[in-house]
Amino acid sequence: MSYENILAEKLEGGVGLVRLNRPKALNALNADLMRELVEALMLFDADPEVGCLVITGNEKAFAAGADIKEMETATTVEMLYNDRISLWDRIHDLKKPVIASVSGVALGGGCELAMACDMIIAADNARFGQPEINLGVIPGAGGTQRLTRAVGKALAMEMVLNNRWLTAEEAYRFGLVNRVYAPEVVFDETLRIAREIAARAPVAIRIAKESVNATYDMFLGDGIRFERRNFYFLFSTEDQKEGMNAFVNKRDPKWQGK
Ligand code: DAK
């Protein structure tokens, strides 16, 4: 499949890679890019050879946000009726783990895209911000919600109200990103982690992602019950029998995804 705004590639070790590819516009997320991104991610999500998805940009920009030039003259009704929101929802609904490998700026919708992923691996030159207030708007793809849950109210308010950007190190300290690496190695380190995850028991990985994400939607008691049912459910899989038998017999497990 060839695209105009992204590069998509299936890599060894079960990784589906999408590289945002509008470098002249700092990977600003226009409607075509978003459509292509979602299409590529959904194809990888449905591909049995792929176990983990990676989204990245280039050294200068993960993404500088939604395309301001495209939105400048939009009306409320146009924003309401175009399919941008459903596209973002499809990213949230992916079943396989998604890792954002972030170098350079992740601003506005770019920061929200990274936060919609399950893990963020950052280069030490990465910068995270929600500058929408400078445009007379607010974050529109989860920025007020996911950011606040990740870094807490005090910092989220400063970022959303006063355009404070976080360095990679700060983002790590406040729990927004998983790891920070030098720019030369960040992509390889992301792939290493993605391949490790892709090699794990597929059904359990899928259920684990769903269970952790349920924290966003459920009260604690409901979440605990949801987790417990999922835990019992995994005892109906061959992978559970294999994993526990492999441990007992001191050998490596062979996952079937069944
Ligand atoms: N949109 C369009 N073009 C952009 C852009 C953007 N967000 N960011 C950068 N560019 C373009 C610039 O216009 C410039 O293009 P030319 O002038 O060369 O044609 C080129 O990229 C290089 O940018 P600069 O010349 O500005 O580069 P600098 O290194 O000087 O500055 C910068 C880099 C990242 C500080 C600066 O470009 C900047 O401030 N960019 C805007 C950042 C921003 O405000 N981002 C938030 C956008 S609003 C929604 C979902 C999501 C969203 C909304 C709704 N729904 C589901 C409904 C999200 C909204 C947003 O993200």
Image (tube, rainbow, N blue to C red):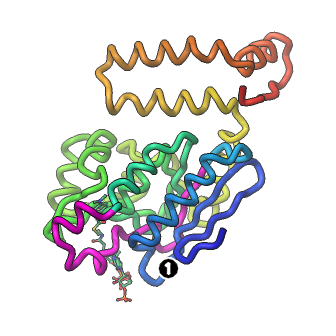
Q: Which residue is mark 1?
A: 23
Residue 3 point in image, percent of width and height: 59, 73
| Residue 214, picture quadrant | top left
Residue 203 point in image, percent of width and height: 64, 29
Please report the residue visible at 30 percent of the width from the left and 54 percent of the height from the top: 141
In the displayed structure, would residue 232 be above or below residue 68?
A: above
Please report the residue visible at 37 percent of the width from the left and 58 percent of the height from the top: 111
**Foreground residue among 196 and 69:** 69
- Residues in magenta? 53-82
**Foreground residue among 23 and 37:** 37
**8 in magenta:** no
| Residue 67, picture quadrant | bottom left
Q: Amino acid at mark 1?
A: Pro
Please report the residue visible at 26 percent of the width from the left and 44 percent of the height from the top: 145
Q: Would residue 190 be found to the left or right of residue 128 on screen?
A: right
Q: Would residue 137 be found to the left or right of residue 188 on screen?
A: left
Q: Residue furthest bottom?
A: 24
Dot 1 falls on a residue whose secondary structure is helix
Could you tell me which quadrant the N terminus lies in? bottom right
| Residue 235, picture quadrant | top right
